[in-house]
Amino acid sequence: MQRTTSTALRGLLASAASIAVLSTATTPAQAAPIPADAALAVERALQPAAMPIGPKTAESALIALSRVADGMPRYDYFPRSIRLAEGKTQRFLYDTAAADCLPSGFEPDNYSVGIAQAIAGPAVDESLPEPVIPPGTVNVFFSAMNTAMSSPQQADNLEVAWLNLTTLQSGRAPMFQERPADYIVTLSNTIATGSGTVVFVVFGSVLDYTSRALPPCEFAPVVGVVQA
């Protein structure tokens, strides 16, 4: 179900001391060309979240905002490396984006769309090293569309931060390849959040394993609200 534009915009630019919270709104800008002052404004809005903000992150955020504001349909993608025998997935509030990181052939839209989802326990994913996802635990996974292969050996700088609104517990963890490799880069982590309503934000960058000359895909933060 499509979220309202205002909810997605608040989610994209929301921030607090250690985790993004749905509280800040901004005005969508055109994805291309990117006005320098608008990109700077978005970058400044993201800085208070204490997230690593790369030179492309602000441009990525503008693309994600434009996709929501223009009513573009969300990607219908589910990683083939996930074999869910029990439980269900919960999608994050919107699809995010990473600017200018795909090989030739994708122009003029040479950006990657990022899809974040979560599986709250109790659940069973037979592709995980530990298949059982217990109650009070959430597996967060992120797929970077049009990237090729993930590898346990490469240094993807993707992280997930979370805040349990019921217990006020919080944390932050890296995301990595814990399932068999898909053609699409899919990174994840299983986190003991406790039960309750949990706000997650995934942020950082992903590498394209087969295109070594390409820069990392620096994704705009993506927020999800998960019932754990």
Image: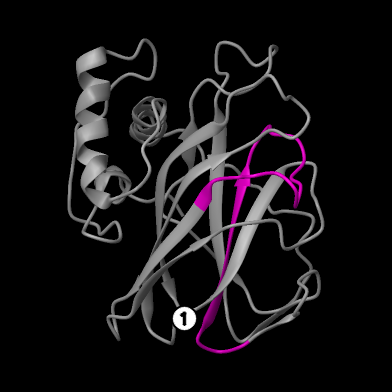
Q: Secondary structure at mark 1?
A: loop
Q: Is residue 142 magenta?
A: yes
> Residue drawn 30% across and 60% down?
19
Name the side, left or right, on which 35 lies relative to 150.
Answer: left
Q: Amino acid at mark 1?
A: Ala
Q: Residue drawn 60% across and 11% down?
A: 107
Q: How many marks?
A: 1
Front-most of residues 94 and 161:
161
State the residue at coordinates (20%, 34%): 44
Q: Quadrant of residue 84?
A: bottom right
Q: Main secondary structure of the magenta part?
A: loop
Magenta span contains residue 179: no
State left or right for residue 210 relative to residue 108: right
Range shown magenta: 134-158
Colour setting: one colour
Query: Which residue sits at x=55%, y=25%?
Result: 111
15 vs 158, left or right, is left
108 is higher (above) or lower (below) than 101? above
Position of 178 with respect to 201 (left or right) is right
Q: Label 1, on which residue?
A: 228
Residue 228 on image: x %, y %: 46, 81
At which x and y percent is residue 218?
49, 34
For the residue pair 74 and 209, the one nearer the viewer reads as 209
The local crowd at label 1, few if under 14, some if 14 to 19, many if 20 or more residues have their Cα within 10 Å, is: many
In the rendering, at what x and y percent does residue 108 appear?
55, 11
Residue 183: x and y in percent read 80, 42
